[in-house]
Image (tube, coloured by chain):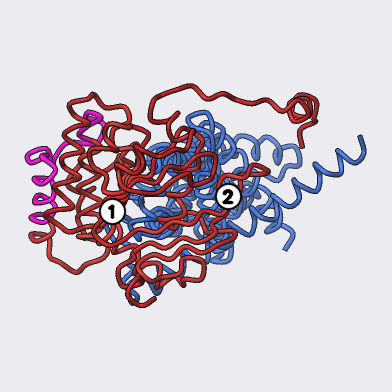
Amino acid sequence: MAATTADTVIEVQGLEAWYGRRRILKGVDFSVRRGEIRVIMGGSGSGKSTLLRHLIGLNRPLAGTVNMLGIDLAHAGTEELLQLRRQIGVSFQGGALITSLDVEDNVSLPLREHTQLDENTVRIMARLKLEIVNLGGFQNLMPSQLSGGMIKRAALARAIVMDPKLLFFDEPSAGLDPVVSAELDELILKLRDALRMTIVVVTHELESAFRIADTITVLDHGDILVTGTVAEVRNSQNERVQDLLHRRPRDLVVDPDEYLKRLTEEDD
Amino acid sequence: MVSAALDRLGRRTVSTVAGFGYGAMVLVESLFFLVFGRARGQRVRWSAIAEQMRVVGIDAIPIVCLLSLTVGVMLAIQFIAALREFGAETGVIIAIAKSITREFGVLITGILIAGRSGSAFAARIGSMNVSQEVDALAVMGVDPVRYLAAPALAAMLVMMPCLTLLADVVAIVGSGLYAGPMLDMSLYNYLQQTLELIKPRDLLEGLGKSVVFAVLITLVGVCTGFSVQGGAEGVGRATTRAVVWSITAIILADMAFSFS
């Protein structure tokens, strides 16, 4: 299996996650190869955000293993985890820019914290990344002065400032107009080609998913329905995948016993 | 009924113990980063500490002066009225000097800073938590405790004793403004007598308390901030809780000091 491990950057096996008594991830197996753009797709409540939180090490797995760039997250020490985090970049759904810092300081933050570079170099590198995401000249604005699309692009610049091997992108098109969201898709493709990153995108936007993805994983109620190329997913025979692709409302089957139990049971 | 009440009691107990444990962990981690961080490439920035010192300490100077002046005058009025009944007016100076340096200077400062900075810590970290900024720091490999808690703790440890000392001086001057004329003394004489009567131990007791209060206020504020859940309303609740609990904590600690 040596050949596959060299090529696989994310390897998840039997991952379980619970919120209280709700089972969010039901033994998920998941792997991503070097250099691909993987889109994790699924409706609201499918567990895709929870899976992402496990991948970036914000949640520790209760059961199962998460292996990133050869580091087992469940058993990683502080030093190993820190090393891993220098090699991954995350762009959060709401941007999560530090509100008290301007755009340039936000982008420079990882450089200042992890490197010994002098201020001039830090400034130039930060501005370079801002140019890549088409935010050149906006470095002195505060996050509150930016539009939704600009916040996402600034967050992306911060995520790539350390030239990570792995980039995670949570809902790139949520809350953006179609043009800006299309621009962001182009940007993601450009990044992969120019900087040779492996990119994992979590989204529920079909159009954007099909445009950028090499491979797609469809998640539903904590199960992986299908993983494959765009064509394979489009032609999947799975009914729930087709529901998602054709925006059909789900036929929710109501189990009478479960239903009564939910209505009558006391809170704990 | 009984089992539900027991259940609640048990859950509360567990969460309280967990809260204390979390506070202790944040304290130990902050101190660790402050002392060893630099050597391990995980330094706490001087600029962050200086900024916090300004917000926590320098900006609080006017209000600390105002309140301690008022408390000084008030104490002088009360002590003179009370001791005059026994014809013990000469004891007024030492009574005021000791009660201010041992008790009131630090307590007024503590309550003020709890209301000002404890709530600010909780609100700032809480809203950062809600907008995923704390998560973002963590995935960037910037420990949120190092980046947010350690500078606040360092600044509080320096500024609380300074503010307490300032409050002592201003409160004693305030008391002198009223008590001096009442005792037929000039303010200069009053202050000179006060200086002769205060022992280093009195000042040290106040300063020792101020260090403990600094730790309590910071930890309560920071920990409630980190544990915020549920959006803007959660931030509001956390801010209130931070003020109430940090004032409670410093008053309880003050009582413990008085016993020992």
Name the one closer to the observer, B125 or B34: B125
In the image, the segment drawn in magenta is A123-150
Mark 2 lies on residue: A26
Name the one closer to the observer, A47 or A209: A209
Give the Cα separation between the discs numbered 1 and 2.
25 Å
Label 2 marks which chain's residue? A
Q: Where is residue A4? Give x, y as percent.
A: 34, 70
Name the kind of residue labelled 1 in the image.
Answer: Leu
Q: Secondary structure at mark 2?
A: strand
At 71% from the left and 57% from the top, the residue drawn is B256
Name the one closer to the observer, B233 or A2: A2
Name the kind of residue labelled 2 in the image.
Answer: Lys
Residue A140: quarter of image: top left
Q: Where is residue A175? Give x, y as percent.
A: 31, 27
Disc 1 vs disc 2: which is toward the camera?
A: 2
Q: Is residue B189 visible?
A: no
